[in-house]
Structure formats: C-alpha cells, structure tokens
Amino acid sequence: MKFKKEWMKQRWFENLSIVLIGILFFVILENFGMFFDWIGKILKFLSPVIVGAAIAYVIDPLARLFEHHLFEKMKSWRLKRAFAVTLALLIILAVIVALSVFLFPQLAESIKQFIDNLDGYTASLKKFLTGLGEKLPINVAKITSSIDDFIHGASDFIIKNKEVILSKGLEMGSGIITFLLGFILAIYFLFGKYHLLAGFKRFSRACMKPEKYKSTMRFLGRCNKIMTRYVACDCVDSLLIGVLNAIFMLIMGMPYVVLVSTVVGVTNLAPTFGPMVGAVIGGFILLMVNPMYALIFLIFTLLLQTFDGYILKPRLFGGQLGLSSVMVLVFIILGGRMFGVLGVILSIPFAAIVSFVYQDYILARLERKRGIQDGEEETPEAESIKSYQETTERDAAREERKEARKIEREQERMERGDRSPGKGLMDRIRREERDKDKDDDSDDSSENSDEKKEEKE
C-alpha cells in the first residue's frame, strides 16, 4: 500500500500519530536506563569519528584564516586549502610539542614536589593557626583536626581505590588512542572539507524544497558562527587569564606558578563555576605553603575575574550572544548533568542557539500566525516602564481613596452636627468649590465678550 499525502490532512491520521508518539514515549520512559545505555554504546563505538570531527571543527577556523588571508592570491582552491591546513596543523603540533617539553614536565614536577612537602606544609599551617588562635577567638583544634581528617581521608581513599585508579588510568590510555585516531581522521576531514560540504548540500537540496533548503542552510550557518566564535574566544580568554595569573605569581614570588596558572586557565574554560573552582584549588595549594600567599591570590583572582567579566569577555565575544544570566545558569546545570564537563563548557553556545531558535523561528511564527506586527510592547524595557506606571497609578488611586474616605467621614460628622473636628477641612473644600465656580464664570464672561466683539465687527 502506497502512502498518500492526503492522509496527513485527515483526522484519523492525526489521532493515530498522537497514539503512536504516546506509545513511543511510554516505551522510552519504561526503558530509560536501557535506552541511554544503548545510546552510550553507539557513541562509544563512534567516538573516534566524533573526536575527529570535533578536532577538525576546532582547527578549521585557523585554517580558514590562513586560506582567506595568507594564501588568498593563489588561483587553485585545492592548493590554497592544502597549504592553509598544513600550516594550521604544523602550528597545532608545535604547540603540543612545546607543551610536552616545557609545561607538562614542570607540571608533573610541581605536583610531585607538592605531595612530597605536604607533611611539612601541614605542620607549618598548624603552627600558623595556633599563633592565630592566641590572638583571635578561633577553635584551632577543630580546624587542625579537620585538615588531618581531610589529608588522611585522601590518603586512605587512594590506598583503598588503587584498582579503580588503575582502571581509570587504563581508560585514559584508551582515550589517548581514541584521540590519536580522531586526530588522524581530523586531518582527512580538514583536507576534504569542501567535498563533504558539497555532498551534504547536494543531498539536502535533493531532499528539501528550495525555500526549506535556504532556511535550513541559514540556520546551520548561524549555529556554526555562534559555536565557532564562542570556542575560539573562550580558548583565547582562558589562555590570557592563565598568562596574567602566571605573571602576577612570578612578580609576587609565589611557588607552583605553572601548576596554579594551568589550573586557573583550564577551569576558566567552564563558565560561571569554572573560575570559582580554579580559585579554590589554587588557594588551597598556596594555603598549604603560606596563608598570606593564598589571601593575596584570592584577592587578585577576584580582581582578575572582574576584569575578565566586564572588560575582556565583552570585547572578545562582541556582545553577540545576548543571554540572560538565568538562562546561562539553567543550561550550565542541565549540560553538566547530561554531558559532564563537556556539557558545562558548551552550555553557553547551546543556550545561544536555543535562544535565537525561539526568538527567530518559534516566537516569530506564532506572532505572524496571530497577526502581531512586532513584540516591542513585550520587551524588558517596556515591561519595566509598564511596571513603574502600574505602581504609580496604584499609589495615586490609593491616595484618592484615602482622600475620598476623609471627605466622607467629614460629611458624616457634619450631618451629626459635630463641626469642630473637620471644620478646617470642610472650609477648604468649600473654598476650592467657590474658586472653581469663579473660574467657570470668568471663562463664560470672556467667551460672551468675544462673541459681542465679533457681532460688532
């Protein structure tokens, strides 16, 4: 039996679709865990391809920059793309080699040195707290016991969970293999970008109507612009924050510059909560060395994040995301719960995409359907003005009601013959009425004089 488009307009087809969707939704809810396990297995199977596509997506803006500016005079697009991708890959490999030679050894040495000196740091911290407890009413014994419990608990956890840590290490090894496979695939994706795009567009054009195809390409182009700009600017912002933190720590002569600055820069990739986590970790490391270092570091981190939030990020992002803080917080929580750290990092561009889809597609379509020309009356500024007007009108109405009740009470006293309490108020009301009558009489007389002048002329 062949499917007919006329069936979609029938009532029975709508009812059948609703029933089938309900059954599918019920089956998914009944097998929720199994459903996500199945999706997880598929994603794990496709992880090299996904990682390769992600790496290619991150490197492509740099390659496109070289392609359109450095090699723009080349006539052959194949050579232009090949040279641009090769140069971008060489720069990425140079950065990885530099990190492996200079940063990672120092990072490992800092971690090893901190662990070796942990007992000495704990003793010096206890001594500092004891001296502080003699001057201030602080329960030093409770604080030192909490520090001991934390350190012993961490040591016991590491000893008891050696197998788990070893298995996680093996998972990291498999993750490195997946990353290498993904990087190889990313090279092919970068060189074959235009072939892949041409094939995708050709398939989409064959499946869609011309208007639908154009709107879909505009939508995907805008999503790509938001995601690319956010990822690039977030990486640059985190790099600058890490470098500024390292410069400050070097000037102040603080230890563990590489370790703390790396933590600050990496955690800054995650919005909202990331800088807080970096400040807590860095502050704890410096607290074990010298509490004054920790205090100075936290004050500088507060100033640095203020500079980052109000000056650096607005200049990098250009204010194009335009998201409310509530929406950002909701998407950070949902992204973290569903996809972990990656969901937290990509929560803001996802929120921006959802926001413009709602504004430009869903809300605009509903307004056109209802015949609404624009939504200026429902803007935040209009809502603020409307709320202020409603408040002033309500206050004015309240004052009028109070004045009316006063007049009614005075009239009741007058009717009872009690003139003394409200005599002044009633006299004022009578004077206002007489003045009003005089003004009306003067207006009438002026109008009559004007009419007489017109008759004489």
Image (cartoon, rainbow, N blue to C red):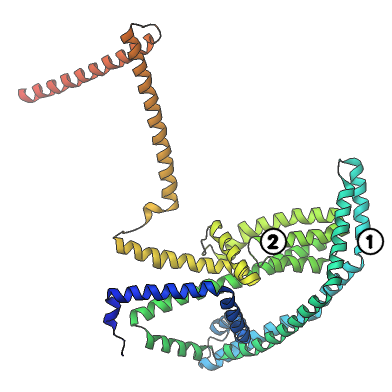
Q: Which residue is pictured at 46% across the width and 87% down the height?
A: 200
**Camera sees residue 140:** yes
Q: Of residues 197 and 177, which is closer to you in this image?
A: 177
Q: Which residue is mark 2?
A: 275
Report how many numbered discs are placed on residues in the image: 2
Question: Relative to residue 74, is residue 7 depicted above or below?
Answer: above
Mark toward the viewer: 2 or 1 = 1
Find residue 87 and name its label: none
Q: Which residue is pictured at 41% across the width and 66% down the height?
A: 360
Image location (x, y in percent) of residue 5: 29, 82
For label 2, the SS is helix
Question: Relative to residue 136, is residue 99 depicted above or below?
Answer: below
Q: How many C-alpha atoms fall within 10 Å of the one at disc 1: few (<14), some, or many (≥20)? A: some
Find residue 120 and name its label: 1
Q: Is residue 43 left or right of residue 431?
A: right
If you read the primary sequence from the N terminus, does the residue marked by circle 2 or circle 1 appear first? 1
Amino acid of disc 2: Pro
Image location (x, y in percent) of residue 440: 21, 20
Q: How many C-alpha atoms fall within 10 Å of the one at disc 2: few (<14), some, or many (≥20)? A: many
Amino acid of disc 1: Gly
The image quadrant of residue 346 is bottom right
Q: Is residue 272 left or right of residue 124?
A: left
Q: Of residues 390 and 338, which is closer to you in this image?
A: 338
Question: Between marks 2 and 1, how big is the CA–CA gap?
Answer: 28 Å
For label 1, the SS is helix
The image quadrant of residue 286 is bottom right
Q: Split into 4 quadrants, where in the image is the C terminus?
A: top left
Image location (x, y in percent) of residue 415: 31, 10
Q: Which residue is pictured at 58% across the width and 67% down the height?
A: 347
Q: Is residue 274 left or right of residue 150?
A: left
